Image (tube, rainbow, N blue to C red):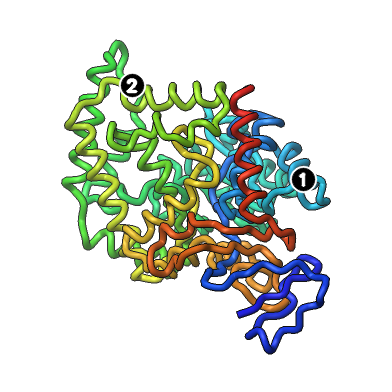
Amino acid sequence: MTVLVADGRIAAIGHSAQVAIPGNDKQVDGAGKFLIPGLADMHIHLTGAGEPSGSREFIIPLLVANGITTVRDMGGKVEYLKQLRAEINSGKRLGPQIFFTGPYLDGNPPSFQPSIVVQTPAEAAAAVDKLKAEGVDFIKVQSRLQPEPYYAIADEAKKDKIRFLGHVPDSITAAVASDAGQASIEHLTGVLLGCSTREAELRKRSVAPEKPGESHEETLAEDRAGTKELLDSYSDELAARLIQKFAANRTWQVPTFPMLVHLGFVTPDTDLGNDPRMKYVPEKVRENWQEGRKTELAGSDSTDFTQRAEIIQRYLEIVGKMNQAGVPIMAGTDAAAPNVFPGSSLHEDLAYLVQAGLTPMQALQAATARPAEFLGRSAQQGTIAVGKRADLVLLDANPLDDIHNTTKIRAVILNGKLLERSDLDKLLAGVEQFAAKH
């Protein structure tokens, strides 16, 4: 097929005899190659590497070089994200479309910054109104919210006609979050617990304060015992019931396998501390990443690592069952969390989705058509069709034969701008130079 791009849009698609190409147009020979829509990372933190230079010189170029043309930022400062988006939309800076949540709404003390602490229904409603007025696209809820403010967020978001999404708070169940209208659940929070015959007991134990004077070794032993109980109490029947609820309520799932595998449940086998992509990571960020990995690995033994591998395997099985049941799934990474490389980690996530049981086409759709649907932009993007935004990736090999072929990028078209392989290599070289100096 021949695809004609003009003024940032797809102007025509057809066999070569059907599409007239003006003589002065730039032409790219795509014979034997494969064209897919631009990819979307639906869970990222553009401010996760510091601001402003970290995002502009580190994260954003890596996204573009890896064919990512749309992102959903899941926690950052509104003013900074607005500035980044304005720079990209005006053409001042090359980068993906940005949709964002702004700061988290969380309990006290909050899990991360930037956060707005809400402890009463009135505070929760006021925070939703404030963020809506500031122009965020979504409201993000975090893990330490208590039930009353959580429900107030759900109610106010409905009144303000803005969707809320994020973590399932520790104080409620994934089923309750789904029924409350939470639009998407990130990192499968609360999902494995919701498949346990001992959910209430294990949840209560997980939120209990640390015992005074308890040693690190004692805490690890308790965590190990709790994880074993969680795995041993898994119920296929409860999992099917929860998945059916997600499907009925259309509760979207963004598993973020790169973060789960390489940070949340990292083992020596999945630690990417010596990955060659570290050359793209600035020194200060690299130090933070090293600290994060050390924290997750400290004091752990072979039993812990076996358990972590079992949890990942169980997550893969659950996501496969979700897909079979019609639960909508989107690709996302949680970059730039430790071990989660901006850009390239999305291709890892697609591979994990296929490992979970999605077909290569379904995995591609999790990063293209599904995000467009979630964003309400199916008419503008997500598939290759006349009139849609010209966000495209040209591949040297067929991703339907092997999902890893999404990494074999020959060219990226970003909002109509052609970036050939030499241009993408220049972006990567620029990031490497920036990382060496910072």
Q: Is residue 69 left or right of residue 405?
A: right
From what the image shows, is residue 434 above or below residue 325?
A: above
From what the image shows, is residue 184 above or below residue 241?
A: above
Q: Nearer the viewer, mark 1 or mark 2?
A: 1
* Circle 1/circle 2 CB separation < 8 Å: no
Q: Give the residue type at disc 2.
A: Glu
In front of the other: 122 or 204:
204
From what the image shows, is residue 394 above or below residue 348?
A: below
Residue lying furthest bottom = 17
What residue is rendered at 23% in x and 19% in y? 218
Residue tagged by mark 2? 210
Q: Give the residue type at disc 1.
A: Arg
In front of the other: 374 or 342:
342
In front of the other: 390 or 196:
390
Residue 4, given in percent of the width and then of the height, sits at: 72, 75
What residue is rendered at 67% in x and 75% in y? 3
Mark 2 nearby-residue class (10 Å; few <14, some 14–19, many ≥20) = few
In front of the other: 18 or 308:
18
Q: Is residue 281 left or right of residue 174?
A: right
Q: Is residue 387 left or right of residue 291?
A: right
Which label number is shown at residue 373? none
Q: Earlier in the sequence, mark 1 or mark 2?
A: 1
From what the image shows, is residue 357 above or below residue 207?
A: below
Picture quarter containing residue 106?
Answer: top right
Q: Is residue 240 visible?
A: yes
Residue 372, given in percent of the width and then of the height, sits at: 60, 65
